[in-house]
Amino acid sequence: MMAWLLLRTLGLVALVICLAATLAPREVSGLSVDSQGTAETEIVRKESHPVLFRQKRDWIWNSLYVEEEKPAPRPYKIGQLKSNKKVELKSFKIEGEGANSIFTVDQKGDLFVTKSLDREEKSTYRLIARMYDSNNKLVEDAGDFVVQVTDINDNSPVFTKQYNGSIMERSRMGTKVVEVSATDADDPTTANGELRYTLRPDGDRTAFEIDSITGVISSRTDSLDRETRRQYVVVVQAQDTRGMASGSTATTSVTIIITDANDNLASFTKKTYELQVPEDHKLNEKIGSLELEDRDEIQNKDPSFTIASPFNNMFDVERSPTKDGNLMLKQPLDYETRSSYSFTVHVHEKLQFLADNADTALTKAQVNIRVIDVDEPPVFSKPIYSFNVMEEMMVNNIGMVTAKDPDRANKSIRYSIEDKDCPIAINPVTGQLSTLRKLDRELEATYMFQVKAQEEPSGLQAYVKVKIVLQDINDNKPELAADEIYVCENDMAGTVIGTVSATDKDDQLPFFSFYLTKQNANFSLIDNRNNTADIRVKQGAFSLDDPRDYTLDVGINDGGRPPLINRATLHIKVCRCDARRVHTQCKAAARRMGVSVHALIAILLCILTILVIVILIVMRKRYQKESLASMKNSGEIHEQLVTYDEEGGGEMDTNGYDVSILTSARHDGSMLRHPEHHPHPSLYAMVQKPHHHAQPTACKGDMAVMIEVKKDEADHDRDGFPYDTLHIYGYEGPESLAGSLSSLESSSTGSNLDYDFLNDWGPRFRTLAELYGVDGSDRYGPY
């Protein structure tokens, strides 16, 4: 076993020697920085072979420090770069933060600082060093090192904001008030940046203390009283170098407010309160104020009040917005019953602490109230009166409304109803109510009105509402109510063709009964005893071609006391229906036509109006005929006498007789229709208007000839009837092309027309022939 182990060890040594001979080691040099301390670090890398390995080398490394704010009128040395590499001529280069400006290196490797540094501006600088030979070939690879700026106490503490705090009075000792904090730009890891807090003696430090490290201000007593002192001001000092006397300091003032707590009892300001109240004071309104004294702030006051019996139901005390007591009236006062009241009021308040004024507070007070007499209006015995009255009856004693004067004078009262349309009257002395007319419940079931009571002679008034409810009597007949009733042509006996019911305006439970007032051969009426009745077919058949109408005479009994009966006629129409008894064609039943009273009155008025108009027209015609007859008998017709149906006359008519137009029309034959065109010429000739370019001319002497011609034409016109009046012409005035013509003073004496031919027309025209026939006197003309 030992031999085997020895052989194994020798084999391993041989293998290591072979590997060492095979691998060619890279030349490694060391880079060192010489200063106050040493450190070793070595890194070896084989560039021509992929295998990495480490080879120990001496790397002397020292921490480089620069004191801040150190003057540098000329560069001063802070260290040296060294290399173990045996090179005769060397050169060094540095790179990094502040290289070749703040920090420089010479040919010997000495490192210099060229300016004063501020740690608060930059506390560390990172640099890289390289070493070259005389041929400027890199001999030593890069090495990193750090230059640290050491701190000096060149900054004072600073409070960055203003601090204020608050604490409730009577808080326990050690209660936190506020935490203050200062800053220092110096290194916090050194004494230069470590702060300590204290309260300066020039502030109120008797009631408060501060934690020197955290800066928390807290109370050092439990007897803070806001009513004694409401505010404290403490001065806080922050000092660096852990509070050493040589350290820098800063101060700030902190205002501490003492907040209020309910630690004082509410106290009456008086032992006795004297109040005067009129007897008509309104309920639930303030009588007077019971003022309190409480040193606590209003939001912390919490007083409550109680009134000792027996007047705790008569009065009450409510808390006012200012936390005083308002004395309220709960029941009405009456000077005649009681003129004064006296009672005790207590005030209570729950506190968390022992009250400061527990020995001096007035927690009860005496209240004396004197009632003042006032003249009060009348008082009704009830707030509202209600009476029942039977309808359709005159009632002399409905009920009585009473009021009295509540004062000791007890003045007399007079009653009245101010509503003029009220159907109820009242006795002005006794207040007794009665009806002025019969009342109909179906028109208005309830009446509401006010009764006024007025004292005499002062005139104080009061009002009360009175309600009259009308009691119903059975004074309305029932009325038949039915939908459209029809019978089908194929309805068999026993078929129910409809149901009828009834309505009643009276206010009673309906119990209607139905029956036929006259027997019907085709239909029967079956009372269902539930306020309805069925109509059944008794026998058929029915047909649309049957001209008969079917009706039922139904009687209705309303079952009232006394019972009222009404009769109605129900019309039934015949229809052609389908299998489901849905009508498709119906013959409407004849219905009786009725006229209401209002319609009858309207018809009568219309007839009377028409009669009056006819009478006026007849009288007017008669008057006109009498006027014309008187004109004929007068024997004197003026030249300008002309009758018109249209409005007009005056100067325009005096210029309207342009005979030239008529003359021209006569010459050209346009005024008459010749017999060849019309065998029976009419009374009026058709006058044609001339063309605008033609201007007819005539003389005034032709007027007589023209009139004679017109007279002759009128006498020989068999279709017309003779006019004894003046002829009327439609063309008149200067604007017309034809003037007016008149048959003034014309007669038939000059006519050669013989009316004896009328005798040949028959006996019906014999009378007309005698009227227009020419006798012996007419042949010779007038006298």
Image (tube, rainbow, N blue to C red):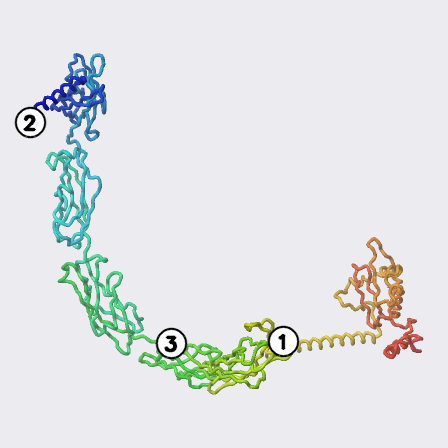
The x, y position of residue 730, in whole percent, is: 79, 64
Answer left or right for 663 relative to 22.
right
Which residue is at 15% across, 54% downward? Answer: 170
> Which element carries disc 3, helix, strand or loop?
strand
Badge 3 or badge 2: first in the primary sequence? 2
Question: What kind of residue is marked 3?
Answer: Ala
The x, y position of residue 75, in whole percent, is: 18, 20
Whether residues under marks 3 and 1 lie with C-beta atoms below 8 angstroms apart, the answer is no
Query: Which quarter of the picture shows residue 572?
Result: bottom right
Indicate which label's residue lies in the foreground, 2 or 1. 2
Quadrant in the picture for the C terminus: bottom right
- Nearest the camera: 605 or 37? 37
Badge 2 or badge 1: first in the primary sequence? 2
Query: Which quarter of the picture shows residue 12?
Result: top left
Q: Residue furthest left?
A: 2
Answer left or right for 27 relative to 453.
left
Answer left or right for 621 relative to 458.
right
The x, y position of residue 126, in whole percent, is: 21, 26
CA neighbours of label 1 inside 10 A, class few (<14), some (14 to 19), many (20+): some
Question: What kind of residue is marked 2?
Answer: Met
Report whether residue 240 is seen. Answer: yes
Indicate which label's residue lies in the foreground, 3 or 2. 2
Question: What kind of residue is marked 1?
Answer: Leu
CA neighbours of label 2 inside 10 A, class few (<14), some (14 to 19), many (20+): few
Answer left or right for 575 relative to 671.
left
Q: Which residue is mark 2?
A: 1
Q: Which residue is mark 3?
A: 462
Q: Which residue is mark 1?
A: 544
- Nearest the camera: 194 or 296? 194
Badge 3 or badge 1: first in the primary sequence? 3
Indicate which label's residue lies in the foreground, 3 or 1. 1
> Which element carries disc 2, helix, strand or loop?
loop
